[in-house]
Image (cartoon, helix red, strand yellow):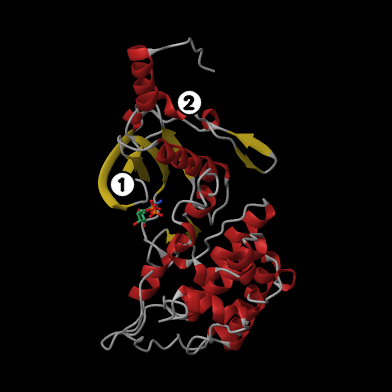
Amino acid sequence: RMRRKILSGPDLQLNRLREASDSMMTEYNPNYEFGGGTYSLRDLKDIPREHLRLVKALGQGAFGEVYQGFFKHRAGDAVEMPVAVKTLPELSTSQAETDFLMEALIMSKFNHPNIVHFIGVCFDKHPRFIVIELLAGGDLKTFLRESRPKPDRASPLMMKDLLSCIIDVAKGCKYMEENRFIHRDIAARNCLLTTKGPGRVVKIADFGMARDIYRADYYRKGGKAMLPIKWMPPEAFLDGIFTSKTDVWSFGVLMWEVMSLGYMPYTGCANREVMQLVTSGGRLEPPANCPTQLYAIMTQCWNPSPDKRPSFPLILERLGYCMQDPDVIKSALPVYTKPPSTERDT
Ligand code: ADP
């Protein structure tokens, strides 16, 4: 789109600098395919910066700080909507710019109650913003760990709360499967809650792994150390094959995380040992007090042959039966026994 003339010497350098600081986003404008359409930067909804008010920092993301804030639709509006604002620091590499744009594109095309809702972007100048719905309950893994029974208090959760979290994630996964989107990193740490209290809804909120495969140098950067091995099926870590059935396996591991109230899967095992264990047929044990009906669904998700793993509609049907089953619903919460000191939090 930019007209170029032949430049040399200082002109060329100046031009390069200008490009590097400003037009990176328009210079390199990758496409994103979803649901049969192709999308790029200009398909993203722009929000005027003045309609945003950042209130406090929520945490550090892969790019920059994530803030809690408020957004108003029109300049004069009295009502403001709570939002989360992901920021890209001014001094970012062009790779980070592209990754940030790709994350916005990915999130913008989803439209489902169990996937974080995209609101818009401010990409006109620095710092760049991605505005999404605020999920004030934090991530699912932390929530589960905080909900463990303590000596002085029983867990505030019941079996139906855990099942409801699992069903929420399965619904988001079913939607992604329908749209042929492979997430590649379904795990409790990547799901966020609307609220910690009753009525909470769990949403899939992190698309870092799917985003990164759009990168030209993906396989060079970080390499295998970056892969979520404990959530991956053998064909993924052995042969690099990713399908919706990859997500089904990972979903089984997420079910295990929920039913163990946020335990690290294969506690104390290094990735290398887990790959060895899983390829030779070893599987996660049922979490303490886990209803057999739920563990049965997990083991179906971990079928060595991808074709034999259930689809998400079938998983949802089976989870629905569990929700109706008094034996499941009335079972006591998982018992939390102190993990070995080797538990690592990655
Ligand atoms: P990363 O880039 O490491 O995957 P994120 O950028 O997704 O992390 O998030 C960084 C922090 O911001 C995390 O603590 C996460 O819980 C929080 N966060 C991200 N998105 C939202 C949101 N929509 N609502 C509330 N908090 C969020």
Whether residue 209 is visible here, answered yes or no, is yes
Quadrant location, the N terminus: top right
Could you tell me which residue is drawn at 54 percent across and 52 percent down? 210
Question: CA gap, disc 2 to disc 1?
Answer: 26 Å
Q: Quadrant of the C terminus?
A: bottom left
Which residue is at a point 49% across and 65% down the rendered structure image? 228
Q: Secondary structure at mark 2?
A: helix
- Tell which circle, 2 or 1, labels the residue nearer the N-terminal end: 2
Left or right of 291? Residue 73 is: left
The answer to whether the residues at label 2 and label 1 have Cβ atoms under 8 Å apart is: no
Query: Does the numbered disc 1 mark a residue whose Cβ is under 8 Å from ligand 1?
Result: no
Q: Looking at the picture, which amino acid does disc 2 mark?
A: Thr
Q: Residue furthest top?
A: 5
Q: Type of residue at label 1?
A: Tyr
Return the mark for residue 270.
none
Look at discs 2 and 1 and give the one toward the viewer.
2
Above or below residue 253? Residue 106 is above
10 Å neighbourhood of mark 2: few (<14), some, or many (≥20)?
some
> Is residue 164 in view from this perspective?
no
Between 204 and 155, the one nearer to me in the picture: 204
Q: Is residue 180 above or below residue 280?
A: above
Residues 151 and 184: in front is 184
The part of the image, by quadrant, that contains residue 174 is bottom right
Front-lying residue, 135 or 39: 39
Mark 2, residue position: 26
Q: Is residue 61 above or below residue 267?
A: above
Q: Residue at x 36, y 43 (%)?
A: 85
Residue 323 in picture, x, y percent from top left: 59, 77
Q: Residue at x 44, y 56 (%)?
A: 222
> Which numbered disc covers residue 67?
1
